[in-house]
Amino acid sequence: MKRHQKLVLAGAMLLILALAATQGRHVRHLRESESFYRWMLAAAVNERLFQDESGQFKDKELFEQCNAASQKLAGLVPTVAAVAKEQPKAASEPPAAEPGEVSEIGKASQEYKNDPRIWALARSNELADARASFLKLARSRQLRFAQDIQYAEAQESGVGLFNLFFGFRKVAANFIWIQVDRYWHQGENYRMVALMKTCTALDPHFVEAYLIGSWHLSYNVTAKMMDTPWPQRKWDPKYSACVGEKEKYYYVAINFLKDGIRNNPRNYKLYFDLGFAVYKQKLKDYQNAVKYLSEAIRQPHDRWVPRQLFICQELNGQYAEALAGWEDYARRFPQTSTGQEVAPRFIKRNQGHLLEKRAEEAFKAAAAATDPAEAERLRKEALKFREQAKDIFMVLGSTEGDALRMRIEATELAEQKRYMEAVAVLDKARWESAELWDDLSHRIMRYKADGNLPISLSEQKEMEREKDAGLCAGMPEQERQRVQQKNAQLN
Amino acid sequence: MGAFIDFFRGPWHIAVYTYREGIRKKTLIGFLILSLLVIFGASFISSYLDPTSETDIDLKLIKDICVATISIFGVLITIFISASVVPGEIENKVIYTILSKPVRRIQYLLGKFLGAQLIIIVNLVLMGFLFCAALYMRQQVFPSLLLWSLLLTYFEFLIISAFTFAVSCASTSAVVPTIIGLFIYITGNLTEFLKDVQNRAGQSGKWFDDMIGWVANALYQMLPNLQNFSLKTQIINGQPNDPPTDVLIPNLMAYGTLYAIFGFLLAWVIFWRKEV
Amino acid sequence: MSIAIQTSKLTKVYEGSFRAQDVHALKELDLIINQGEIYGYLGPNGSGKTTTIKMMLGLLFPTSGTIEILGNPNVGSASVKRNIGYLPEGAYYPDFLKGEEILEYYGKLYGLGGKDLRHRMAETLELVGMTHARKRLLRGYSKGMRQRIGLAQALISDPAILILDEPTTGLDPIARKEIRDILANLRDKGKTLLISSHELLEVELICDRVGILFEGVLQAQGTLDELLVQRDVTVDVDDLDDATAAKLAERGLQVEDRVGTRAKLRVASAITAYEALELCRAFNLKLIGVAPRRETLEELFVRVVGAAQSTRRQ
């Protein structure tokens, strides 16, 4: 080979090496941007849904820095309104949450379709400073939500967890999970909880671990426990709630799921379990249940997910939303058995609830009206709504419809001070529908009290218990008064 | 155009022949059988879990173990094949009959390299197919994400293969290149440490300390980082439309290809004036 | 007659690793091989034969000096190698392939294909007498069959020059004879053959010219007629006894290869063949035959190498 050929070859090699190194730099940039992007989504979700702040971490400051930097990029993150215009929403999708204190990035993160925009933001030059400080903070472990910096540079403290398992940490997470499972069967809950956290630290995208872990905590662990009576519970300022033995685990489960949501903000299962399994089923906190179930259906989701949202909306008294949801559902899935059989029943039920609610409002308005003619008109309207509701419940049929109809009849009887008859009707009604048992029993007690009718021993005990409901030691005064007022209103 | 095709005709015949010869190696078949055992064994490991929990956790376990298995056995196959295609032929003197034909040395190398890639790809496809089948039997859904994962796995192997191949061209037996290949795999996964070395160096302010940091940084910039490909373990359980993943996959493919070209050129430089 | 292969001042030094001595494998070798001849390239083991051949094929690179093949100094290039068929010594042929598949593979490397290749394959297989075994796997081949298939792969492109490294090593006499016939046949077709060997008898039987290499130096080169000395006559006799033998020796007839009563009488240059025959009659010996005696290649080889060894010792 001639000399110039050697030179050409050497040149080609250098060129390729330079290209490869450049591509390596680009890949590194992308991977750093990726972890930055995941952190940004986590921070945005946290800001929008949890407002979970902690003094020792610097997530919030960095997120503010990101937001400020993104302001310079007009149009990169479209406003919520612009997104809504771009993608006309189906009626069942919940309206965008109240903006409140939510930042630009936070707003954009609401829609998973904006992910490419946030990703573009995360790797843009404009956010280079924020990205650099992200890497610095993440390496020195000052960011709570930056759990997976596998793709960033080596950690400041040397051997990172990922190096221990040589890139196979996800496999390690699986084997740890098998151990978690064993601990669960042996009933060693504390060990189980600790290992669960290790497991998700190794693999932050281990969605099943979050799901099963929170299920263990909120269902299986607490199944063996007794309910803590209200007065013995303790106020926990962190959760703003009275916490008993069981609740302690519920909130651990909630935090675990929230961690999962921050790491996997586009997985509906986590939102669903948080809203349905814990808030609805365990804490009976329908407001939060609706909040998280609404988030669940904002992500790509299975067909059965919205159903629970509508049920929770109904339980939370949001009949109009539930009605609209069911109607849309029936329209979209006319072929399914849910669309054909279940949805019409729920539609009727919610229509009835809605009419009942309007009737109550009309009665209230009539009572408040100064003009007698106006009051009379409102009263007539209310009666009309009430009749319509009864008709609908009639059509709804089955034991459930009967119970709901009888509830209205009892209300009418009570208004006419025929308390004995009202109680009799309700007593019959509550054997018709198990779902309404608690509600109807409460009404019976109320009417008995109003009509000075004798109450049974168990009812007496129940009322004693109800008086303390929601009250516990160490509550802030304001909260105590609010709960007491609510209790007084119910009884 | 005709000359271009002519140039690749010889390498293609050599590649096909290399493939036909290589696919019969007993060690290779052994690795393959072992990996298949693990892939199917993963189903048994998942039976340790609570059968009452109605989730896809066993599915995840199978996926993770299988991706890891494919990586480990695939790397062994890759190293073993890349290290032996050229030295094996020097050992049994077949190389004399080939290089004495009107075949240029680069054509010969290209043929051997392509042949090795064929073997690696076929093995990967075979393992991937069985993995797919194992998943399909459980899930009844075709695991399309697995294909992306396998693709990334292949490009990781491509880098290891090219560098092992370059080493093997300097050697007359397959033992040393195999050991060096394993070394390349291990160090390639630890490239991130160089950044750590750089961060730690330069603290004493002495010139040699600074120099160590400088060298570490230079190596960090130049050497391939196989940890980049750990994305393959993430894809398999991830979301279908993850914007960073979508961008990273083609970039990682380009990354793997460029380093593979460099490794191949290195092999050529070594083999160019090699006396066989 | 034009020159097929010519080397001038070809030198090869294998550099020793640290502290080890350099090995001078070839020292200023001037080799000339004419077209259309069979050239026997002789030398003891380790004398540098294979090194020379590998340099001709571009497998090794000369330390200094040049090689020209068919007038082209760019050895190792595809255009030169296209005209060469090479049978390496002791090469392995993949035994999972069939005989004809191997030929197909090597043929394709020559750029042959299609009908052309099939035609050449049939022809070559016929030539080396392997047509009957073409469909069999190499695993089932005997050593001779492998050597034949090796020869076939060297011949597949019908090259002008054939370089054969130890073509008959390890074969039985019948196979040797057949291969020899094939080679002679090729020479008759106008091919140039370079046969490296230390089987002197083989070479003597078919080669036109020989070169004797010892320790990297070409000790002798030329046609057999030029190199071998025509020296004397031998007389084969019977009924010889000890007393007669002693008397014959006094008269200048040396007794060689005596077995029982039979012996060869070597006629020294001092007496003529007639005188020798007279003596035989005088001693009443039974005459079996009279033959001229030429120096064998073996003798030449021993002579040349021995001379080289003694020069080195001095």
Image (cartoon, coloured by chain):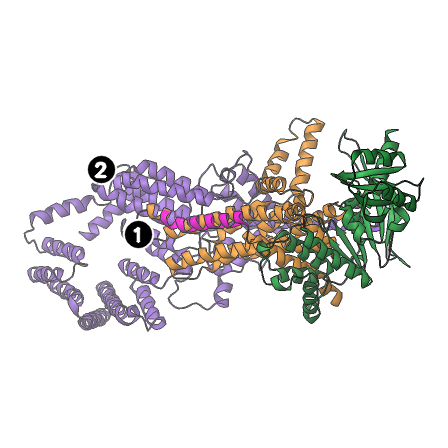
Chain colours: A purple, B orange, C green
Q: Tag 2, which secondary structure?
A: helix
Q: Position of residue C144 (x, y in %)?
A: 65, 53
Question: What residue type is disc 2 on?
Answer: Gln
Residue B11 is a magenta residue = no
Count of labels in the image: 2
Q: Nearer the viewer, mark 1 or mark 2?
A: 1
Same chain check for tags 1 and 2: yes
Q: Residue A243 sits in which quadrant? A: top left
Q: Is residue A343 left or right of residue B225?
A: left
Q: Chain ID for label 1?
A: A
In terms of sequence position, does the residue under pointer 1 or pointer 2 come before the other?
A: 2
Residue A120 in view (yes/no):
no
In the rendered image, which residue does mark 2 sit on?
A232
Residues in magenta, as a range: B25-44
- What number is the disc on residue C109? none
Q: Residue A420 sits in which quadrant? A: bottom left
- Report the front residue among B140 and A77: B140
- Report the front residue among B270 and A341: B270
Q: Residue furthest left?
A: A454
Q: Position of residue A83 (x, y in %)?
A: 50, 63
Q: Residue C160 sits in which quadrant? A: bottom right
The span from disc 1 to disc 2 (Cα, nearest Å) is 25 Å
Q: Position of residue A303 (x, y in %)?
A: 35, 64
User: Image height check: is C101 above or below B82?
Assistant: below
In the rendered image, which residue does mark 1 sit on?
A277
Q: Tag 1, which secondary structure?
A: helix
Q: Position of residue A285 (x, y in %)?
A: 29, 51
Main SS, magenta region, reads helix
Residue B38 is a magenta residue = yes
- Report the front residue among B140 and A309: B140
